Structure formats: C-alpha cells, structure tokens
Image: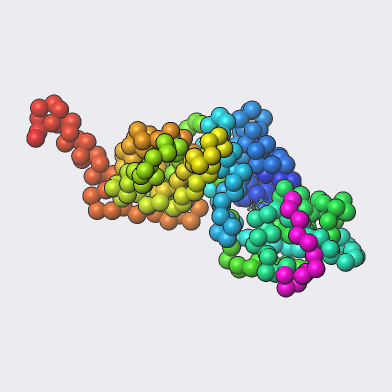
C-alpha cells in the first residue's frame, strides 16, 4: 500500500483530492503543505497531495515555494475539485463573532460573509479543517470548511453550498521523488519553474521558446526568489509531455536560457488534448531531425 501524505488535518479539500487520486492507499495528514512535501523528501511518504491553484484566488504560494526549494519533486497526477463550502458551528452554539478558514477559502466566501455574518470577524487558519478543529476547541465560533469536515468533527451546519462563485474549482497535484514518468496520453500538462537573470526581455525570451514551437501555456505565475529583492522565479505550465519530441526541443531551449527545474509531466484532469500547430507536431520534429541526421551522414541536403 502506498503511503500518501496530504495537506490536512482530516477533512480538508486536499484529503478529498488525495482519496480521488489514490483510492484505498494509506493517507496521513500533515499540518502544512511544506511538511507534507518534506515527508516525501524524507522518505516517510511515497507521494504527497497538495493544492496548487484555485480558479478564484489563484495559486497556493506554499505549494509553489515548496516545490521550487529543497530536493526535487515531480507531479505525476492532478485532479480538479469543485469548491463550495459548509459553514460549521458548535451544536447549539451562541453568537458568531469569529469565523475562521484558510485564506483562500475566506476569499471565496467574502460576499456571503458580508451578507450573512456581517458582524463576524474573519480569522485566517492553516487549512479549512484546522478552522473546524478550532471551532471544536472553542477558539472560533464558526469555520468555513469542506463539506466532508462534518463527518470528522462534532459540529453542525449553519449553511451548506456556500460559494461567491458557484463554479469555483481547485486543482491538486500528487507529487513524488523523481522516478519513472507517467506515460504520455496526448492530453498532458508539463510544469516547470525557471529562474533567469534579471535583464531586459528575459521572460519574453523564455515564452518565445514555447510560442515558436506552438506550445500552449496553461498557467504562468511569478514568485520572488526570496534571496534578492526584485528577482523572480517563473512557474510555467504548458500543454504536452516531456517524452514528446516537440517538448524535448522546447525544454532543451529553456534549459539553455534559465535555471530550470522540471516539476512533472502528467495527464490533465480535464482530458483536454494538446493544441498542435501546423508544422509543430511531434512527427514534424522527428522528420526535421531525420533530415539533419541525413545531412550529417552526407546522405541528403
Ligand atoms: O484547506 C483546505 O481544505 C485545502 O485543501 C486548501 C484549499 C486551498 O489551498 O485553496 C483548497 C481548496 C479551497 O480552495 C480552499 C482551501
């Protein structure tokens, strides 16, 4: 049985994602994303499930920083969950003066809180489930939690199906120590982080390497390097798998232009097939390479 670390405690959306990605495996909650990733690096877990981006609030900084620092880890799978919340309180309970949750969750229910609990003070907690634990322990009066949290904690629902944006989604990754890659499916995503020198055109030079090969971006984010003010790392997701000739070509070019870390090639949860531009398909790259090989052997021109 695989040992799967996940961003917990029990009852987070991430636990739900881990169950979807690794059904029947041995799941262990860790209090922070960093600790879940560390468990994989230390060998205490075979893989970790962590949130990466939300359609309303954007990226999860702890995950980006956790993947770019420390020993390399690579994503082997992703899943996307619809996000709507339950607001939980102690049974009976009294006035709701504080309402706690993960900052991403609070940001996704801001309008609901203003309309329904205008006098309650929002308080940030390490996860949606940590907020539920805090309510059980009397630290807060209510928690904005994943619907499954009610199964883990002796709380009652003040409201369910809460979301300012009704079709909000969060994407989660399963990451491991580098090893065998998942096979290409034709509907894959590749994730990288690139640090380049601070000079005019650096970012555009990186993006051009993808654009000229007809490779479609699915996400780009910048995070500070944390060492030199004003220096950034670029987290780039694009369509395709590193085992494809067109992606190999792009990765080699990016590697020449930046300090590059490969963060994985894995099947897309939405199964959207990669866009292939005319003349930029894998066979086009293979044919071009075969032509160059023939030239080198003196067999063609
Ligand atoms: O706290 C949780 O339940 C999580 O799994 C984290 C997280 C996030 O990081 O965005 C996941 C989904 C929701 O968007 C809110 C919180």
Is 259 above or below relative to 142? Answer: above
219 in magenta: no
Left or right of 216? Residue 178 is right
Q: Left of 89 or right of it: where is 256?
A: left
The image position of residue 285, as x and y in percent, is: 25, 41
Magenta region, residue range: 114-125
**Residue 155 image offset from top left, x and y in percent:** 84, 59
The quadrant in which residue 37 appears is top right
* In the rendered image, the vertical position of residue 150 relative to residue 260, given as above or below: below
The residue at the point 33 percent across, 40 percent down is 250
The quarter of the picture where the C terminus appears is: top left
Residue 19 screen position, x and y as percent: 64, 48
Question: Residue at the bottom extreme?
Answer: 115
User: What residue appears at the point 85 percent right and 52 percent down from the top-left corner?
Assistant: 139
| Image quarter hosting the N terminus | top right
Q: Residue at x 59, y 49 (%)?
A: 60
Q: Please name the colour scheme applied to the rendered image.
A: rainbow
Quick check: is 116 in the magenta stretch? yes
Q: Residue at x 80, y 65 (%)?
A: 120
Residue 257 appears in the figure: yes
């Amino acid at each position: 049985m695989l040992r799967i670390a996940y961003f917990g405690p029990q009852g987070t959306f991430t636990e739900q994602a881990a169950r979807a990605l690794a059904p029947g495996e041995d799941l262990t909650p860790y209090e922070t994303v960093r600790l879940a990733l560390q468990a994989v690096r230390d060998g205490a877990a075979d893989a970790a499930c962590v949130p990466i981006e939300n359609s309303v609030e954007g990226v999860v900084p702890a995950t980006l920083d956790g993947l770019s620092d420390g020993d390399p880890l690579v994503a082997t799978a992703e899943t996307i969950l619809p996000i709507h919340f339950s607001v939980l309180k102690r049974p009976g309970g009294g006035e709701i003066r504080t309402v706690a949750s993960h900052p991403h969750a609070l940001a996704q229910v801001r309008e609901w809180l203003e309309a329904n609990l205008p006098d309650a003070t929002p308080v940030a907690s390490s996860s949606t489930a940590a907020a539920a634990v805090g309510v059980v322990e009397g630290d807060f009066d209510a928690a904005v939690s994943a619907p499954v949290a009610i199964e883990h904690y002796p709380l009652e629902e003040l409201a369910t199906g809460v979301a300012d944006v009704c079709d909000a989604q969060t994407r989660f990754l399963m990451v491991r120590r580098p090893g065998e890659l998942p096979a290409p499916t034709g509907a894959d995503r590749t994730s990288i982080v690139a640090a380049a020198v601070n000079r005019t055109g650096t970012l555009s030079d990186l993006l051009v390497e993808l654009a000229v090969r007809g490779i479609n971006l699915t996400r780009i984010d910048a995070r500070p390097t944390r060492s030199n003010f004003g220096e950034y790392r670029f987290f780039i997701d694009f369509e395709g798998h590193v085992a494809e000739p067109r992606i190999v070509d792009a990765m080699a070019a990016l590697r020449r232009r930046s300090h590059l870390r490969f963060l994985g090639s894995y099947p897309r949860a939405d199964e959207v097939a990669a866009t292939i531009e005319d003349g930029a398909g894998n066979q086009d790259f293979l044919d071009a390479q075969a032509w160059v090989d023939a030239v080198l052997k003196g067999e063609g021109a």
